[in-house]
Image: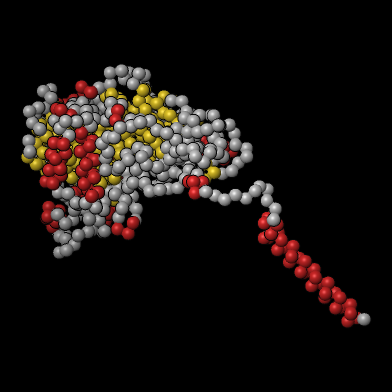
Amino acid sequence: MTMTMVESIVLLFVLLMLLLLIILFFFSFKPWRFFFSSSPSRSFKADELERPLVVEDINVSCNQNTELPRDYDLEGACYPCDGHFRSPRTHGLVNKQRLPAVSLSSNVLQGTPATSDSLVIDITSDPLEDVGQTLKLSSAKLAEIQKHTGANFGNARPRAFVQKDISDQRSCLTLEVIDGPSLGLHYSVLSSSPSRLPLTLGRVSPSDLLIKDLEVSGKHALIKWNLDRMKWELVDMGSLNGTLLNSQPINNTNTGSRNWGNPTDLANGDIITLGTTSRIVVHITTQNQQNIPFGVGMASDPMALRRGGKKLPMEDVCYYQWPLPGLDQFGLFGICDGHGGDGAAKSASKLFPEIITTILSNSLTRERVLSLRDASDILRGAFSQAEACMNHYYEGCTATVLLVWADENENIFAQCANVGDSSCVMSVDGNQIKMTEDHKITSNSERLRIAEMGEPLKDGETRLYGINLARMLGDKFLKQQDSRFSSEPYISEVVHIDQARTAFAILASDGLWDVISMKKANQLVLQMKEQLSVDRENSAEKIANFLLSEAKTLRTKDNTSVIFLDFDNSSRFYCKVES
């Protein structure tokens, strides 16, 4: 009897365990889903695979576009645009990987009104590859993100801007991506270049400003110039996730289809938000054409395709100001190539215009430069002060600065100073003039200078503490360790350009000079100028991009930046942008 009870208990326990396992199996694998379905099954067709990824939300509000028929053009339409000259970056400026967040210029952050036109360009990269379909966010998700990050989405313009009367002036628009995966991108266009307008913003080619962000539609928004009203206007192109201008939506609220929004005026300092993460600051400047003394073109590219496919961070910074604040006769052009980061290069690009403006604000100093036709002391003092102001112990940069001024007879004078290997060359009436000195460890002049200090370099030694430069700005730690490092600049002779002479100048970082000699660069410029002899609009910009394209063709493996100055009277207009 006892054995029978034990056996019964064991059997009951086994049955309970089996029942528990069966219940666990049902709840884990849910086999009933194969027999019961809330909707009939359907097969997917090929064209459905091209539709955007959509977060399903039955509570989508009227501000969010609903799902479209399969045969609808997901990327919307585009204004007709004639073919036009393109830079080597085939579809405008293109993208790079996300970099650490960088701040806007001090003027923007401090709310200081700009007193001069200037431009800082430090980013472009290789053409964007396919990044998939647009990730559509639900209205609830968009609202939640904007609620928690509203402070970062520019509820107000970053500084107070004064709108100028532009009825008799050309307008230059520059877009700068200040947040999101494509941080650092720039794109500039003139209101007087109808072949390059409207300007399109989107995730896929042929958008002019390519934004590598899954929340950005293929054709997201466009900017056009309204000639009747003399205003830049922003239009949402029926994007999935909408467009914000200073945190206010400008997309069409019609939920029936992806209709375009109404044109909205743009002003200097506006913040455009595409999706939730990509923010773009708007720079708008105007310039009377008669006041521009020569043409300026700028181009820059990190040249991200390297051996092994590694991405190359952008450490070049191009900048210029013409005229310097309160100094109608003077302008400054420069290139800084950073190492160990771009912090030193950005600091130097901000310091030089400020320091030189301060020095030349003294009327006696300014008159001495004009009368002696020499600015050596000003340039040498500027380098000394810039070095003293820079607190970069583990970052450094090259610095090449070209000071240009005009006298009362409209003659042009140019003088250059540099440390490092970013170089400048000028051509005057066909004669090549080298304006800089190479300060690499391998250069004869630097090896001789170091030898005279009593600590000569060893045969075959090409680097000091891992650096191939003997002169630079910053790198305070290295300079404390070894006195052979220097920030003393090379100062060129003054080049005089009267109205009867033809002349141009090329400033570039070593990414260009690594693959193109100065003689070859001059030949390429002359070749391009001949091709552009008929259509000279924006010729300086086209030539700068042409030189950049040649460097890429020759597979340079370093950041490359180019500034081209055309001193011919026939091409004296360029686009100037406030930094």
Instruction: Please state the horizontal and vertical placement of residue 197, each as a whole percent of the image.
Output: 33, 30
Vertical side of 172 occupied by 484: above or below: below
Describe residue 265's horizontal placement relative to residue 571 as left or right.
Answer: right
The colouring scheme, among rainbow, by chain, secondary structure or one colour, is: secondary structure
Please count the marks in the image. Answer: 0
Vertical side of 142 occupied by 484: above or below: below
Instruction: Please state the horizontal and vertical placement of residue 366, each as a whole percent of the image.
Output: 17, 28
Answer whether residue 513 is visible to the viewer in this image: yes
Vertical side of 149 occupied by 97: above or below: below
- The residue lying toward the viewer, choosing from 220 and 69, is 69
Describe residue 11's horizontal placement relative to residue 319 as left or right.
Answer: right
Instruction: Please state the horizontal and vertical placement of residue 425, each as a whole percent of the image.
Output: 14, 42
Q: Quadrant of residue 400?
A: top left
Instruction: Give the quadrant of the N terminus.
Output: bottom right
Vertical side of 43 occupied by 528: above or below: above
Q: Quadrant of residue 458?
A: bottom left
- The residue lying toward the viewer, choosing from 307 and 66, is 66
- The residue lying toward the viewer, choosing from 73 and 6, is 73
Residue at 86% across, 75% down: 8
Residue at 11% across, 38% down: 427
Instruction: Give the quadrant of the C terminus.
Output: top left
Answer whether residue 104 is visible to the viewer in this image: no
Residue at 43% across, 25% down: 263
Instruction: Please state the horizontal and vertical placement of residue 372, each as a whole percent of the image.
Output: 9, 30
Q: Quadrant of residue 24?
A: bottom right
Residue at 29% across, 35% down: 83
Describe residue 149's horizontal placement relative to residue 477 as left or right.
Answer: right
Instruction: Name the residue at the right extreme.
Output: 1
